[in-house]
Amino acid sequence: MKFRKRPIRSFTLIELLVVVAIISILSALMMPALRIARDSAKRAKCQSNLHQTGMAIQMYINEKSGYLPFARTMTTETPPYPGVPPPYLQDLIRPYLQGPDIGMGINSPVFICPSVKMGWVLTVSPRCDYRYNWWFCNGWNLPTPSRIGITADSLTMSSSAVVVFDMSWNNWAYKDLPHNGIAAVYADGHSAFIDGSWFIANGDEFSGSFCSTGF
């Protein structure tokens, strides 16, 4: 008994091109959704970092008679009077942060923003992609600039007083902001995302409703 072999049917060039086109279209449709999901995850990580930072600042305040950290996060943040600049924020709050990576210098993830677009690493202190609202928190905006900082009780509205936010430089444009906006932690300890349209850069310090409100 003889069996007739069935011819093996192969894809034609047109069919292959159609399949490739369908895959390309599906990929193009999925990419924006994947990018949004990835950006959302980075923003959530950033706000988690700031939440930890805010909790550490609260513990610092409780142990320092109610005073906000008298600190800075960049070498350019100098006092408006002659004298030695204050220490770096990340060095002051490090003892209040928990986790195995804390104390590992530039490898400490709490001070690294996963979406930073213009990373900046301190040469004399561990990396910090976040910035302390030093001008107001140090009391340097007062008629007689403070040399020891201010107390949390002196804030007019602690829930709207920005303490730390995820931006290193003071002259970034909207397109340079992490997450196309800013994640921030407030004096009462809560963190939130601020749309980039609220951001106002003003020379060497920050102004407008973003940073000065609540001080």
Image: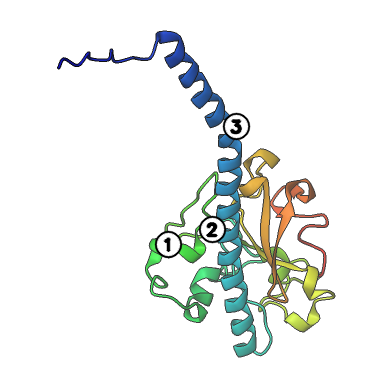
Mark 1, Cα crowd under 10 Å, few <14 / some 14-19 / many 20+, is: few
Residue at 40%, 10% (x, y): give it: 12
Which residue occupies the foreground of this view, 156 or 97? 97
Q: Does any portion of residue 44 appear in the rendered image?
A: yes
Q: Which percent across, then down, holds residue 125?
A: 44, 64
Tell me the tag on residue 124.
1
Is label 1 or label 3 in front?
3
- Residue kind at label 3, given as amino acid type: Leu
Helix, strand or loop for disc 2: loop
Helix, strand or loop for disc 1: loop
Tell me the tag on residue 29.
3
Q: Is residue 18 above or below residue 111?
A: above
- Residue kind at label 2, given as amino acid type: Thr
Q: How is the image coloured?
A: rainbow
Q: Residue furthest front?
A: 1
Q: Residue furthest left?
A: 1
- Mark 1 or 3 closer to N-term? 3
- Mark 2 or 1 closer to N-term? 2
Q: Is residue 24 above or below residue 108?
A: above
- Mark 3 or 2 closer to N-term? 3
- Residue kind at label 1, given as amino acid type: Val
For the C terminus, the quadrant is bottom right
Residue picked out by circle 2: 75
Q: Does any portion of residue 215 appear in the rendered image?
A: no
Residue at 80%, 76% (x, y): give it: 155
When asked about the image quadrant of residue 31, the answer is top right
When asked about the image quadrant of residue 149, the answer is bottom right
For the N terminus, the quadrant is top left
Is label 3 or label 2 in front?
3
Q: Which percent across, then down, holds residue 204?
A: 69, 51
Q: Is residue 183 above or below residue 202?
A: below
Residue at 29%, 15% (x, y): give it: 8
